[in-house]
Image (cartoon, grey):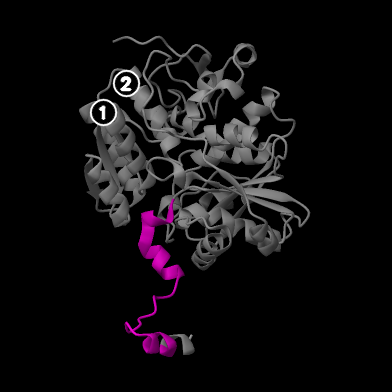
Amino acid sequence: MKYAPPVHVTGLKCEICGTTYKHGNIFTCPSCGDEGILDVQYDYESISAALAKDPLKNRAQNIWRYSELLPVSADIARPHLFVGWTPVYDIPRLAEAFGIRQFFLKDEGRNPTNSFKDRASSVGVLKGIEFGFNQIACASTGNAASSLAGLSAATGLKSYIFVPERAPEPKVTQLLIFGATVLRVLGTYEQAFDLCKAACEKYGWYNRNSGSNPFLVEGKKTAGLEIAEQLSGNMPDWVVVSVGDGCTIGGIGKGLQEMYELGIIDRVPRLLGVQAEGARPMVDAFISGKDLIPSDTNTLADSIAVGTPRNWRRALRQIKLSGGEMIAVSDEEILDAMRTTARLGAVFGEPAGVTGTAGLKKAVEKGIIKKNESALCIITGNGLKDIQSAKQAVGKALDVKPTLEGLVDVMSKT
């Protein structure tokens, strides 16, 4: 079946040379090669007119409420899974603990496969269908993989997932239960990414990798669109995001900028990008002002353990456009953030999911974020996805005999 192209998309623009191409199944600029990641362009004047006729307040609370700002044909049925419009919590206890005026958490673990990546995969599977594919693939340290497997199951696509050998077992199990063909690559994420790309070219699979596929970032930007709506009357001074490939913070920044362009918010929050010390090539590029230099990775935050970020230009551009900053945190600080976020905010995040929270604390200590300012942290994935890391962050259960005397004895020693 041939589908009509998205109405409000005007083209795909290269992040390096600025050349604009027609909408189609194209990932990178032919002139700039793999480095020339493309960015979807829209007709914001026509979108503004469409929103005037059918305001957002009248629409379903999921990512498809932003249909005019998503590059998906209107002819394709949307997946039945409920993606997006995740809750934002105002948590005074965490604000007090971090020493800032107001603190918000946006819990992306509430998505169908328990991570932020469901936003990207929702768009990815539909673009695959739109372009005539019935098989789709990606490389991932875990969350993008499980989201693709879940959304593929929802739409009837066959999925092939390439994971590095260090991928946590709960995430691999989630892939298998959704029926994906899982290929555990005996190497790094970067090697899995390259192998996935080669496999897509050889077997004719649709490539869902958000580091190169320009449409996946559009799904991720819906978190920025939501933040603008959910907090339009009380926009935070900062939005804090953990950073791996750069697609997430780049997408959220774009979504916030679009809501400003459309007049839905009157200012754009500053972005704070946070990487793990063991995987910080983008922080180093931000500080140096030079091109990114790939690096080795060594961090328990597997979802952001990316030494060769594909979308670093987009990420740094959005951070700088917002007047934002970048910072790196240790694995010990990440584990501490897992405890603090759960015990004071009752949200259980995986290591990469709370890396932003660890970065916020450090940014306040360094004076980057002021004590009279407010911030929103995005918890990108649920802690049950990496239970081994959670076990490192907490103590053991207390063994007690099944008698009151036994309980008294144990309690006397705590």
Q: Earlier in the sequence, mark 2 or mark 1?
A: 2
Q: Residues within 10 Å of mark 2 (few under 14, many from 20)?
A: many
| Residue 35 appears in view | yes
Q: Which residue is mark 1?
A: 157
> For numbered disc 1, what is the local secondary structure?
loop
Q: Residue at x 39, y 89 (%)?
A: 405
In the image, taking residue 340 as reference, residue 398 lies left or right, namely: left
Q: Residue at x 36, y 19 (%)?
A: 77
**Does 54 appear in magenta?**
no
Q: Residue at x 46, y 23 (%)?
A: 31
Kindly identify which numbered label has been placed on residue 129.
Answer: 2
Give the total of numbered labels: 2
Q: Residue 340, located in which quarter of the rendered image?
A: bottom right
Residue at the limit of the structure toward the right, as seen here? 372
Q: Residue 403, located in which quarter of the rendered image?
A: bottom left
CA separation, marks 2 and 1? 8 Å
Image coordinates of residue 154 in percent, x first then y, are 30, 31
Q: Residue 98, located in which quarter of the rendered image?
A: bottom right
Residue at the limit of the structure toward the front, as seen here? 404
Image coordinates of residue 348 in percent, x first then y, are 47, 57
Query: Against 154, is 329 above or below?
Result: below
Query: Against 152, is 51 above or below?
Result: above
Which residues, given as a range, are shown in magenta? 382-409
**Magenta span: chief secondary structure:** helix
Image coordinates of residue 199 in percent, x first then y, are 24, 34
